[in-house]
Amino acid sequence: MKLNIAVLPGDGIGPEVTKQAIKVLKAIALEFDHQFIFKNADVGAIAIDKTNNPLPDKTLDLCKNTDAILFGAIGDPKYDNNPSAKVRPEQGLLKLRKELGLFANIRPVKAYDTLLDKSPLKRKIIQGTDISIYRELTGGIYFGEKHISDDGNTASDLCEYSKTEIERIAHLAFKAAQARKNKVTLVDKANVLESSRLWRKVVKEVAENYKDVALDFLFVDNAAMQIILNPKQFDVILTENMFGDIISDEASVIGGSIGLLASASVGEKYAMFEPIHGSYPQAKGKGIANPIASILSAAMLLDHFELHKEAQMVRDAVDKSLKLKITTPDLNPDIANITTTKVGDFIEDYINNPDDTNLNFTNIHLGQSTII
Ligand code: IPM
Ligand code: MN
């Protein structure tokens, strides 16, 4: 298969983790005889520095003329600490989502057996957790009308949803549930918000088309508690934009590190793949950023094009690296010499030589192996 992939490394640790994902995709291309063509473009703070625009037209054009987008991260402390900045890196990502119509953000959350003790949650609570969060991505309070009064003392953000916006992601969530454990949980705040009541009504109607899928409802405050109290009760979680943003960060605690959480953002025409961890500026350039979320996002890219064998291979390689503790310090703080690049190298090497039984894992940990 020939795929054109736009690469938007962005800010902070974005470039270093994306580099590993590309390495892994190149290894897959080699192994399975595909042709993946990568083209880079700027987004976020780095784009503001160069052009004063977090999403330059050149970047948007590239994204619109490509098969898929691999996204790193955006954000920079110099904007976080300056609420009055008019141009902000995040605007680049939000505009990209809107312009490309990426209305569904899919975030898988899984408890890896090899990492159960990394989570602050008890093993017996998280073991076996496998959740797919379907977060609406181009509507709601993120994109509603914003207002600040002339005196600067009153501000508002409108949360608005249309039936069509709810229906299209609901269909995707139900279809996903049919291929999983046949359950959708709608997370909302229908006891208070009119927009949430519309979500309930529309999702109930959509559910009529999927009789084999059980639908239940949770208020977001209760859902936030249930996710860490009994995460195994969930299969597909369907929710609006901001609730999805919040509960997906919360759910990442189950996996042991936010550095593991991948995501796919899809619409009618385009698809973008990005880790959920953000730019983590404190780690930039130190070689400690976990590349697995970016690598697993690349696996989701492969799945999107029905390259399931290839995606599985990437996941197997990731599993192997976790099992052998070839991981960055967020997962194994005692093992200091495994850098972002080394994790990527190991996964690349495993894809090229899955049956290589001669790896000396003791040496890998000492950083002496020839393969890393
Ligand atoms: C995410 C991020 C973004 C969001 C930010 C960077 C705008 O937190 O993808 O979860 O809030 O959607
Ligand atoms: Mn977020």
Image (cartoon, rainbow, N blue to C red):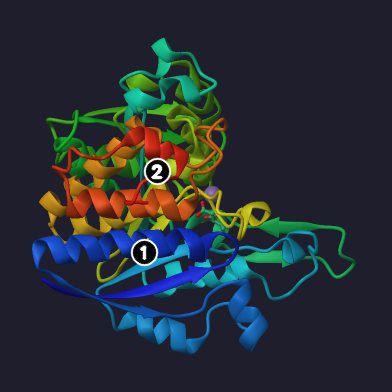
The image shows a total of numbered marks equal to 2
Residue 310 image offset from top left, x and y in percent: 15, 53
Q: Residue furthest top?
A: 124
Asked whether residue 166 is in view, the answer is no
Q: Nearer the viewer, residue 147 or 60?
A: 60
Q: Nearer the viewer, residue 77 or 229?
A: 77
Amino acid type for the residue under numbered disc 1 = Leu
Task: Please state, as top left, top right, bottom left or bottom right, where the N terminus lies in the image.
Answer: bottom left
The answer to which image quadrant residue 59 occupies is bottom left
Q: Residue at x 64, y 80 (%)?
A: 48
Q: Residue at x 12, y 30 (%)?
A: 212
The answer to which image quadrant residue 285 occupies is bottom right
Identify whether 198 is placed above or below 131.
Answer: below
Q: Residue at x 12, y 57 (%)?
A: 306
- Tag shown at residue 318: none
Residue 207 image offset from top left, x and y in percent: 22, 38
Identify whether 218 is placed above or below 103.
Answer: above
Q: Residues within 10 Å of mark 2 (few under 14, many from 20)?
A: many
Q: CA distance from mark 2 to mark 1?
A: 19 Å
**Residue topped by disc 1:** 102
Q: Residues within 10 Å of mark 1 (few under 14, many from 20)?
A: many
Is the C-beta of the residue carrying label 1 under 8 Å from the nearest atom of ligand 1?
no
Residue 205 image offset from top left, x and y in percent: 25, 41
**Residue topped by disc 2:** 199
Q: Residue at x 43, y 31 (%)?
A: 255
Q: Secondary structure at mark 2?
A: helix
Identify whether 56 is placed above or below 127.
Answer: below
Q: Nearer the viewer, mark 2 or mark 1?
A: 1
